[in-house]
Amino acid sequence: MKTLATIKTTNKEDTLKYAFAFMQTESLKIKECTFMNPNPQEFDSKYILPRDSYSVTYNDGVPSWEIFKKNPVHLSSPGFMCVASLDPKDTQRVNLSALNGVILFNCYGNYENEAKKAFKNITSIYETLT
């Protein structure tokens, strides 16, 4: 894994902008974004993580930015994990993860240039959000 970018955000809305922008980036394929549950309750010894570790997961049906940024589930979550592929065959994976205002953008192979282009697309969309 190679970390290509580390961002420290100053508020929740800025953090959410990156998740939303990731899901809007057309150069990414097979996108998924999952928000962590701040208060999981479903503990089971058969599983490493609580069964309700995540509050919500998006694949394609992401609401508008106006709705996304006000969603109580997003606002209460300590972070998210977004993952996608740079290619339709799903062999070049990237992820954008956030925890308590620190965002990391990672790639998992020898395709850093393509991943950096995707990150530029993400930041371009991020910059348009108000």
Image (spheres, rainbow, N blue to C red):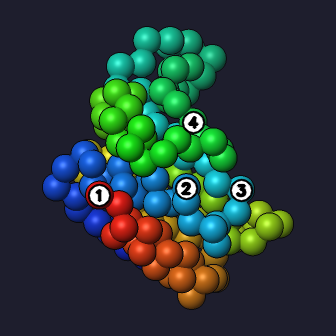
Which residue corresponds to the image point at 19% horizontal and 50% vertical from the top-left?
11
Q: Amino acid at mark 2?
A: Met
Q: Which residue is mark 4?
A: 57
Real-space Cα distance between discs 3 and 1?
26 Å
- Is residue 67 found left or right of 31 in the rendered image? left
Q: Residue at x 70, y 63 (%)?
A: 29
Q: Is residue 118 above or below residue 19?
A: below
Circle number at residue 23: 2
Q: Quadrant of the C terminus?
A: bottom left
Question: Tag 2 or tag 1, which sits nearer the N-term?
Answer: 2
Label 1: how many Cα within 10 Å (few below 14, some 14–19, many 20+): few
Question: Which mark is first along the chain, 1 or 3?
Answer: 3
**First in sequence: mark 2 or mark 3?**
2
Q: Residue 7: horizontal and vertical position, in percent?
A: 29, 66
Check whether the beta carbons of the residues at disc 4 and disc 1 lie within 8 A of each other: no
What is the residue that sits farthest to the left in this orientation? 10
Is residue 80 at all visible to an observer of this figure?
no
| Residue 61 makes an appearance in the image | yes
Residue 111 in the image, given as x and y percentages of width and height: 63, 82
Nearer mark to the viewer, of 2 and 4: 2
Q: SS of the residue at dot 4?
A: strand
Residue type pointed to by label 1: Thr
Q: In the rendered view, does 75 fall on the left or right side of 85? A: left
Q: Return the disc, 3 or 4, that comes first in the chain's sequence.
A: 3
